C-alpha cells in the first residue's frame, strides 16, 4: 500500500500523541524506584525528542497549508484535518509541559520504594519515603554511596504588645545519607538552629527487608502528627508550624530507639520503642520541654509510639498515632516515692490533596498522671501546674491559584483555625491559667517560584480566655535541595 507524505505526517503526529498520552497516564509513583535518576534522565531525553518531533511536524503542516489555501473543496477538507491535527499537537505540547514539571518534582523529592504520594501526578505532591520529607528521603533513591540534601528557614515576626519583633534564621539543615547496598541505609540530619546552636535531628540505620517489614534503629523522629516527620518548609502551609504540633506533639520530637516500619497494600505503619520523655521539664505551656533529643537521655522509663496511615484513595491520607510511657525518670516526690508521670498522647489526622486544593485536619489529646506530686517535686504552685489533660486541634486549607497552568510556580492563599488548651484539666488545689486556653486564626499567602523555594506571608490573630492574646505578622523564606 502506498502512503502519501501527508498521510505519513498525520500518522507520525498520531504516534506522537499516543506516546505522550501513554507517558502522561503513568502515575508519579509507578516508576521502578530501582531505576533512580537514570530513569528520570531517560524520561527527560524522551520528552526532548518528542518536542523536536512535534516542532518538525508543525513546520511541515504550515508549509503544506499555504499552497492548499486556495485549492478545491476536497483540499479544504484536508486543510481542516491538518488544523485539527495542529490543535491536537498543541494539546500534546501542554501535556509535555506537565510531564516536564513532574520530572522536576521527581528530581527534587522522589519517593523511596513503597512510598505513598499524597497528590495526583502533575500537582505539588509530598512524597513520603518511610515517614520522611522530600529532601530527607534522597538517600533511598541513590543507587549506592553518599547522598546530600538539606533545607533552611528564615522567619520575621512582627508582634503586637510588649514582645519584641524578631528576625531569626531558624534553622539550616544538611542531610547526610549513605546507601551501603539495597538492604542497608544510613540517614542523618544535622541542624544549625538560630544560627549558633548545633543539633542532631536524626541519625539511624535501616534494614530494608521487604515492603511489609523493615527495621530501624538510632535517633528517630517520632511518627506523630502531620509535621513532626515531614517538616521541610515547602511541605506545609504557614510561616510557623501549628501550635498544637509544638505544645502537645512537641515538634521536632526525636528520641533514641528502635522499631519496625512497612506497608501492606494501602496501609503503612511505624512502631518504635524509645526512651521516655523527661517529666521534670514539663510545664503549664505543654510537653515540649520534656524532649530529650538523644543527648545523654534518661532511660529509666521507656515508651512505645506507633502510627498507622491509610491512603487507598489517591490524594487522601487518613491515620492516627499513639504514644504511651512513663516520664518520671526516677524523679522523687518531696515526701518520698517515685513519680511515674505516666504520659499518653493520642492524635488523629487527615489530609486531602486534589489538583490545587490542600486540606488538613488534626486532633490531639494528652494525659499526664500523678501531676500533683510532679508539681510538688518541681515547685509549681497555683496556675503554674502541669496540665493533667491537654487538648488541641486545627483545620487548614489552601488552594494553588496557578494549578493546572503548567510551569513551576505556585501561589497559594491559605488559612488555619486552631484551638489549644495545655491546662484543660489540672489537679485539685491548682488552677488553670486562662491564657493557656487559646484560639488562633492564620491567614496567609505562599509563593513558590519553583518547587524547592517558598516565600510565606501570614497574619495570626490570637485570642485566649484571659483576653491577652496578641496578633502578629510573619514572613518566612524557605528552601530545600
Image (cartoon, rainbow, N blue to C red):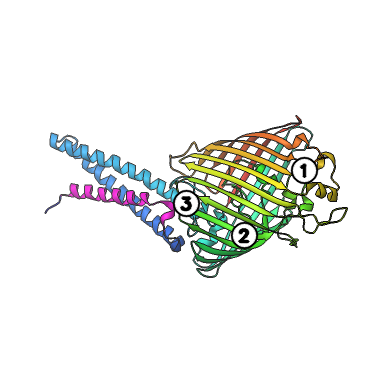
Secondary structure category for the residue under label 3: helix
Span highlighted in magenta in the image: 4-31
Q: State the CA–CA distance, disc 1 to disc 3.
A: 46 Å
State the residue lying farthest toward the left.
Answer: 1
Residue in front for this viewpoint, 73 or 125: 125
Pick the front one: 385 or 317:
385
| Secondary structure state at the residue bearing disc 2 | strand
Mark 2 near mark 3, Cβ–Cβ under 8 Å?
no
Q: Quadrant of the N terminus?
A: bottom left
Residue 68 coordinates in the image, percent (x, y): 18, 38
Answer with mark 1 or mark 2, whichever residue precedes in sequence.
2
Q: Label 3 neighbourhood size at 10 Å, few (<14), some (14-19), many (20+)? A: some
Is 70 placed above or below 350 here? above
Q: Which residue is mark 2?
A: 272
* Mark 2, other Cα within 10 Å: few <14 / some 14–19 / many ≥20: many
- Disc with the residue nearer the chain's start (1 vs 3): 3
List the residue tagged with mark 1: 284
Amino acid at each position: 500500500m502506498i502512503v502519501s507524505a501527508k498521510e505519513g505526517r498525520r500518522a507520525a503526529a498520531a504516534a506522537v500523541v499516543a506516546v505522550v498520552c501513554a507517558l502522561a497516564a503513568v502515575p508519579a509513583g509507578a516508576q521502578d524506584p530501582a531505576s533512580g535518576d537514570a530513569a528520570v534522565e531517560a524520561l527527560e531525553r524522551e520528552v526532548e525528542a518528542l518536542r523536536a518531533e512535534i516542532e518538525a511536524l508543525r513546520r511541515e503542516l504550515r508549509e503544506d497549508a499555504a499552497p492548499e489555501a486556495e485549492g478545491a473543496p476536497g483540499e479544504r477538507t484536508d486543510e481542516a484535518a491538518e488544523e485539527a491535527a495542529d490543535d491536537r499537537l498543541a494539546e500534546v505540547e501542554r501535556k509535555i509541559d506537565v510531564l516536564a514539571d513532574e520530572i522536576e518534582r521527581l528530581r527534587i523529592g522522589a519517593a523511596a520504594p513503597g512510598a505513598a504520594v499524597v497528590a495526583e501526578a502533575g500537582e505539588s505532591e509530598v512524597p513520603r519515603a518511610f515517614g520522611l520529607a522530600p529532601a530527607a528521603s534522597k538517600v533511598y533513591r541513590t543507587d549506592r554511596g553518599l547522598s546530600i540534601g538539606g533545607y533552611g528557614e528564615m522567619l520575621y515576626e512582627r508582634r503586637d504588645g510588649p514582645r519584641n519583633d524578631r528576625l531569626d534564621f531558624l534553622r539550616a539543615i544538611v542531610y547526610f545519607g549513605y546507601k551501603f547496598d539495597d538492604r542497608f541505609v544510613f540517614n542523618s540530619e544535622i541542624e544549625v538552629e538560630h544560627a549558633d546552636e548545633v543539633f542532631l535531628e536524626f541519625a539511624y540505620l535501616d534494614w530494608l527487608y521487604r515492603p511489609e517489614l523493615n527495621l530501624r534503629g538510632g535517633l528517630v523522629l517520632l511518627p506523630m502528627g502531620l509535621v513532626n516527620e515531614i517538616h521541610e518548609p515547602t511541605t506545609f502551609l504557614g510561616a510557623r508550624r501549628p501550635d498544637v504540633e509544638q505544645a502537645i506533639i512537641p515538634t521536632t520530637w526525636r528520641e533514641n530507639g528502635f522499631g519496625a516500619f512497612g506497608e501492606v497494600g494501602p496501609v503503612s505503619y511505624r512502631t518504635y520503642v524509645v526512651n521516655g520523655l523527661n517529666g521534670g521539664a514539663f510545664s503549664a505551656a505543654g510537653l515540649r520541654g520534656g524532649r530529650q533529643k538523644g543527648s545523654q537521655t534518661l532511660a529509666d522509663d521507656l515508651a512505645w509510639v506507633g502510627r498507622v496511615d491509610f491512603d487507598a484513595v489517591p490524594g487522601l491520607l487518613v491515620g492516627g498515632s499513639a504514644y504511651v510511657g512513663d516520664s518520671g525518670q526516677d524523679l522523687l516526690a518531696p515526701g518520698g516515692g517515685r513519680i511515674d508521670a505516666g504520659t499518653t498522647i493520642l492524635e488523629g489526622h487527615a489530609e486531602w490533596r486534589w489538583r490545587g486544593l490542600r486540606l488538613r485536619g488534626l486532633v490531639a489529646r494528652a494525659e499526664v498522671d500523678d501531676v500533683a506530686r510532679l508539681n510538688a517535686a518541681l515547685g509549681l504552685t497555683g496556675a503554674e501546674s502541669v496540665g493533667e489533660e491537654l487538648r488541641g486541634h486545627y483545620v487548614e486549607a489552601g488552594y494553588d491559584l496557578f494549578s493546572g497552568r503548567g510551569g513551576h510556580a505556585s501561589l497559594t492563599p491559605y488559612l488555619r483555625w486552631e484551638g489549644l488548651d495545655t491546662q484543660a484539666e489540672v489537679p485539685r488545689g491548682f488552677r488553670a491559667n486562662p491564657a493557656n486556653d487559646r484560639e488562633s486564626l492564620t491567614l496567609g499567602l505562599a509563593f513558590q517560584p519553583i518547587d524547592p523555594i517558598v516565600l510565606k506571608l501570614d497574619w495570626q490573630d490570637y485570642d485566649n480566655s484571659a483576653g491577652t492574646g496578641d496578633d502578629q505578622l510573619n514572613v518566612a523564606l524557605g528552601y530545600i535541595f
